[in-house]
Amino acid sequence: MEELDGEPAVTLIPGVNPKKQMCFDWGPGEMLVCETAFNKKEKSEMVPGCPFIHIIRKDVDVYSKILRKLFNESHGIFVGLQRIEEELTGKSRKAQLVRVSKNYRSVMRACMEEMHQVAIAAKDQASGRQFSSQVSILSAMELIWNLCEILFIEVAPAGPLLLHLLDWVRLHVCEVDSLLADVLGTGNPSKHESFWNLVTILVLQGRLDEARQMLSREADANPASADMCRILGELMRTMPILSPGNTQTLTELELKWQHWREECERHLQDNTFAASPALESLCKIMLGDEAALLEQKELLNNWYHFLVTRLLYSHPTVKPIDLHFYAQSSLDMFLGGESSPEPLDNILMAAFEFDIHQVIKECSIALSNWWFVAHLTDLLDHCRLLQSHNLYFGSNMREFLLLEYASGLFAHHSLWQLGVDYFDHCPELGRVSLELHLERIPLNTEQKALKVLRICEQRQMTEQVRSICKILAMKAVRSNRLGSALSWSIRAKDAAFATLVSDRFLRDYCERGCFSDLDLIDNLGPAMMLSDRLTFLGKYREFHRLYGEQRFSEASSLLLSLMTSHIAPRSFWMTLLTDALPLLEQKQVIFSAEQTYELMRCLEDLTSRKLECEEPDTQKLQDDDIEITKVEMLRLALARNLARAIIREGSLEGS
C-alpha cells in the first residue's frame, strides 16, 4: 500500500550541539539538514538547543487531496494538447486552443467549488481559514487565466473585446446572483433594503435587461416614480451594444451610441430624475460619470470591475492597444492613493499591458506552486507567443517552468507518475531530468518498482533499468527470495550478481538437498548464458531432471562434462562426485572406463588440493569422518565401476 498524505513527522536529530547552528538546503521534495560549526563574533549567551526539527516540504500543495484532483485533471488536458498540436491549423487552431483554455478553467472552478464546500464544513476555524484562503487563491488564478484567455488566446478585437470583459467581470463578481435571489424571494422586492443596491450592481455589470425588470417592479409598487422608471428603462433598452451575431460596423455602433448618450444627457439636464436620487445616480452611471462610479466603490469591489463598467459606458469600442491606459488610470482612481497595488493588481495590469512575460514572472512570485504558470505558459507557447523568449541557461521559458512543476510532482508518492509526461514534452532537458528523478524514487513496494521499470523500459533508459533491477535483486536476496533475486539479476543482465545468486542457490541445495524455485531454473533458456555459474546452475538442474527421468547415460555425460569443462566451481566438485555414486552403483555400466578415469582424476585432484591448502596441524579432511567416508566410498565405487567397464568393453571388443 502507498503511504497516505499527512503532516510532516517531527524528527529527532541525535547529537545536535546547541553551540552549533543547523544548516538547511532544499533536496528533492524535502529539506536537507546538516550541522555546521559557527563562531559568533559578538559574545552572547547561547540559547539551549533542542534536538527536534520539523521536516519541511517545499511543494506542500501536492499533498492537498482536493488540489490533487486539479493536478490529475489538468494532466489529461496537457497531454491532449501536446498530441493535437500537429493537427492545429488556421481558424480551427484558435478555436481548439480556446477550448483547451476553457477546459483548464473548468477544472479550476470545479476544484474551487469543492474547496469552498470543504471550507464551509470545516470543524475548526483554523482549517476553515486555510481552505478559504485556498479558495481565494484558486479564484485569483482563474481570474488571471480568464483575462489571459481573452487578451492572448482569443485575441478579441474592438467591440467583442468589451463583451468578453463584461462576461469576465460577471463571472468573477458573482455575489449579485445571491443578492438577486434574496430580493426576489420577498413578497415586495422594491421594499427590500438592498433593492437599489441590486439595481445599481446590475447596471454596473451591464445586465440592463434584469435592471429594467427590477425597475418595472418599482414602478408597479410606487406610481409616483413610474414615469421615471419607464424613461430610464427605455434608455436601458435602447442602449446600443455590439452583440456577437450583429453585423453592424464599429462606426455605426459609435454613431448610435453617441445619439443614445446625448439622449441620456438631455434627460439629466432636464432634471427628469431629480425626484429620485437613486434613478438619477443610475443615469449618471450610464453616462460614464467617473465621480458617480467612484461613489459605488463598495458595490464595485475592485478596480478592474470599475474599469470594465467605465469602458462600457464611456468607451464601448475600446481597442486592445488602448486597454492599458484605461486600466492604469482606473487603478489609480480606484485606489486614490489610499493603498498600494496588491500582487494580483500587478498581474492583471501586466496582462492589460500585453506583457506576457511579466504576467508569468509576477505569477511565479505570487503563487505557491508551479501548476498555474507551467500550464498557462505551455498554452501560450502553443499560441506561438513565447518562441522568441529563451533563457540564458539554454532552455526556453516553457520548458523551464514545466521542469520545475514536474520536479514538484516527483516529491509526491503517487503524483510523480504525472510528472513523467511533463518531462517527456521538454525536448531539451526533459529526458536527463527524468532520468535523475527516476533514480531518486524510493522503491518502497515491488508494484511501484515495476511502474518505474516500465517507464524506463518504454524510454530505452538502459542504465536506469539495470540500476532498478539491481536494487530489487538486492532486496530480494536480503529477504531470501532467491527466485525473485535471480529473475531481477537476469533482467538487469548483471553477470556478477547472477553469479552471486546462483551460488546462494547451490549453497541452499547443499544445505537442504533440493532446489527452490524450480520453475524459474527449468525455464532459464538463453538467460543461463549470462554467467558461467548460472550456466552451471541450469545444467546441474538439467542433470537432476535427466536422472529423475532415468536417462542415466545422458545424465552421466552431462555430470562429467560439468566437471571436466571447469564450469562447475571446484567447491562443488564433491557434491557432483557424490551425485555420481548412484550412477556408479547401477546394475548396468553407465560410465565408460575413460569416463571413470576422468572421475578418478577429478577426485584425486580435489583431495590433493585440499591437503595442500590446509595447515599441517589442522588436517581437516583427514579429521572429518564424513568427508573421509565419502572419499573412500567414491574410490571404491569408481574402482568397481572401472573393473566392470573394462570387462564390458573387453567383451564387446572380443565379440
Image: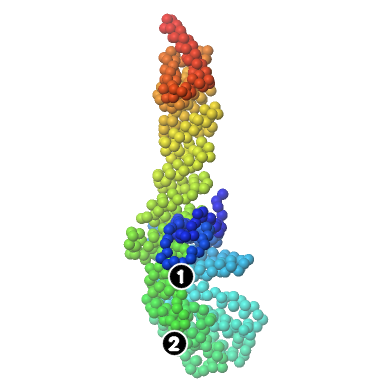
Crowd band around label 1 with a 10 angstrom C-alpha radius: few (<14), some (14–19), many (20+)? many
Looking at the rendering, in which quadrant would you find the C terminus?
top left
- Residue at 39% across, 70% down: 358
Crowd band around label 2 with a 10 angstrom C-alpha radius: few (<14), some (14–19), many (20+)? few
* Residue nearest the viewer, comparing 236 with 472: 472
Disc 1 target residue: 144
Disc 2 target residue: 259
Q: Amino acid at mark 2?
A: His
Name the spot of residue 442 as percent of width and height, x first.
49, 49
Is residue 553 depicted above or below 326 in this figure? above
Question: Does residue 534 show up?
Answer: yes
* Residue nearest the viewer, comparing 622 with 95: 622
Name the spot of residue 149 as percent of width and height, x first.
44, 69
* Residue nearest the viewer, comparing 631 with 259: 631
Is residue 606 depicted above or below 278 in this figure? above
Is residue 338 depicted above or below 641 in this figure? below
Question: Which tag, 2 or 1, sits closer to the chain's start?
Answer: 1
- Disc 2 versus disc 1: nearer the observer: 1
Splitting the image into 4 quarters, where does residue 36 fall? bottom left
Name the spot of residue 375 as percent of width and height, x first.
44, 62
Name the spot of residue 319 as percent of width and height, x first.
39, 77
Q: Which mark is residue 188?
A: none
Q: Amino acid at mark 1?
A: Ile
Q: Is residue 533 left or right of residue 3?
A: left
Q: Pointer 2 and pointer 1: residues touching (CB < 8 Å)? A: no
- Residue at 48% across, 83% down: 239
Question: Does residue 160 show up?
Answer: no
- Residue at 38% across, 68% down: 357
Which residue is outermost to the right?
187
For label 2, the SS is helix
In three-dimensional space, the C-alpha distance between marks 2 and 1, rounded to whole angstroms, equals 35 Å
